[in-house]
C-alpha cells in the first residue's frame, strides 16, 4: 500500500500463505493489527511514517518478520517477532502498555521504546545499534541475547541498551560476537546503560556480579 490507509481491522492469517505486506505511508487501524502470515511485513521507507495501531499489534512468534522504520503507535500491548531496523530509526510507542520483542532482532539504526515495560526474549542477533527505553523499564528475558562487537563506541561499535527505568535481567544467555575485533587492555563495553536510580535486578545466566 502506498498512500494513506485507514481501516477498522487489518488481519493477515497464516492460511493466506507466505505473502509480503508493505505499508509505505501513514496508516490507522482502529482494532488490533494481527499479522500471522509467514511472509515479511514492511512498515515505512522514508522514516517519517506513523503507523497507528489503536488496538495494539499481535504477531505469531516465528512465522513472520517485520522490517520497520518511522513510528509504530498503539493503545494496547505490542508484540513483535523478527524485528529488523536497518537504515533509519524506529520508535515504538504503546501509550504506557507493555512492549515485547520476541525471537531474533536485528537493530542497526536505532530503536526507541515507549512502554510500561519493554521485554526482549530470545533476541539472538542484536547487531550494532542503540536500543533506548524512553519510558518504563527494560527486561531481558529467557533466551540468548547476542551483542555484536565491532568497536568500542556504543551504537556504531556495539549494541547498547539504554534505560531510564528499572532494568531486570532474568537469566538471559549472554553471547558476544566479537568477529575480528580485538579490545585493548582496559576497554570497557557498557552493554546495558542504566541511567535510572534503581539498581539492575538479576544477572545473565552463569555470570554473577563481577564475573569475567
Image (tube, rainbow, N blue to C red):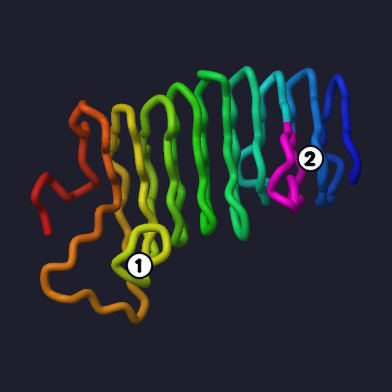
Q: x, y percentage for residue 120?
A: 44, 40
Callout 2: helix, strand or loop?
helix
Q: Nearer the viewer, mark 2 or mark 1?
A: 1
Q: Split into 4 quadrants, where in the image is the C terminus?
A: bottom left
Position of the N terminus, as image quadrant, is: top right
Residue 179 position within the rendered picture, expressed as x and y whole percent measured from the top left: 36, 76
Span colored in magenta: 35-51
The residue sitting at 36% across, 52% down in the picture is 160
Residue at image location 21% in from the left, 31% down from the top: 201
Horizontal arrangement in the rendering, residue 130 relative to residue 167 (left or right):
right
Q: Which residue is mark 1?
A: 149
Which quadrant of the structure image shows residue 54?
Answer: top right
User: Which of the two residues, 62 or 22, is positioned nearer the viewer here?
Assistant: 22
Label 2 or label 1, whichever comes before in sequence order: 2
* SS of the residue under disc 1: loop
Indicate the quadrant where residue 163 lies. top left
x, y (%) of residue 2?
90, 46
Asked whether 39 falls inside the magenta stretch, the response is: yes
Q: Which residue is mark 2?
A: 14
Which of the two residues, 121 or 51, is positioned nearer the viewer here? Answer: 51
Q: Is residue 107 left or right of residue 45?
A: left
Q: Spatial distance from mark 2 to mark 1, Cα to Cα?
A: 36 Å
CA neighbours of label 1 inside 10 A, class few (<14), some (14 to 19), many (20+):
many
Q: Furthest-bottom residue in view?
A: 180
| Residue 124 included in the magenta stretch of the image | no
Q: Residue at x 36, y 34 (%)?
A: 139
Closer-to-camera residue (2/167): 2
Residue 164, relative to residue 176: is it above or below? above
Q: Position of residue 143 (x, y in %)?
A: 39, 46
- Callout 2–callout 1 Cβ contact below 8 Å: no
Q: Across the whole image, how many numbered discs are drawn on residues?
A: 2
Amino acid at each position: 500500500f502506498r498512500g494513506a490507509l485507514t481501516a477498522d481491522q487489518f488481519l493477515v492469517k497464516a492460511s493466506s500463505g507466505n505473502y509480503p505486506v508493505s505499508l509505505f505511508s501513514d496508516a490507522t487501524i482502529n482494532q488490533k493489527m494481527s499479522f500471522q502470515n509467514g511472509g515479511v511485513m514492511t512498515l515505512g521507507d522514508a522514516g517519517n511514517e506513523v503507523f497507528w495501531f489503536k488496538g495494539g499489534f499481535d504477531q505469531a512468534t516465528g512465522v513472520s518478520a517485520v522490517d520497520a522504520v518511522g513510528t509504530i503507535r498503539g493503545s494496547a500491548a505490542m508484540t513483535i517477532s523478527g524485528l529488523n531496523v536497518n537504515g533509519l530509526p524506529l520508535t515504538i510507542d504503546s501509550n504506557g502498555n507493555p512492549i515485547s520483542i520476541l525471537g531474533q532482532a536485528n537493530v542497526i539504526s536505532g530503536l526507541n521504546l515507549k512502554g510500561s515495560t519493554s521485554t526482549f526474549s530470545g533476541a539472538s542477533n542484536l547487531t550494532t545499534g542503540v536500543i533506548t527505553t524512553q519510558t518504563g523499564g527494560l527486561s531481558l528475558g529467557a533466551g540468548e541475547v547476542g551483542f555484536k562487537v565491532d568497536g568500542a563506541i556504543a551504537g556504531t561499535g556495539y549494541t547498547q541498551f539504554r534505560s531510564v527505568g528499572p532494568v531486570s535481567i532474568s537469566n538471559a544467555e549472554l553471547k558476544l560476537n566479537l568477529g575480528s575485533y580485538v579490545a585493548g587492555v582496559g576497554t570497557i563495553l557498557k552493554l546495558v546503560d542504566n541511567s535510572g536510580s534503581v539498581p539492575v535486578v538479576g544477572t545473565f545466566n552463569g555470570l554473577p556480579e563481577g564475573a569475567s
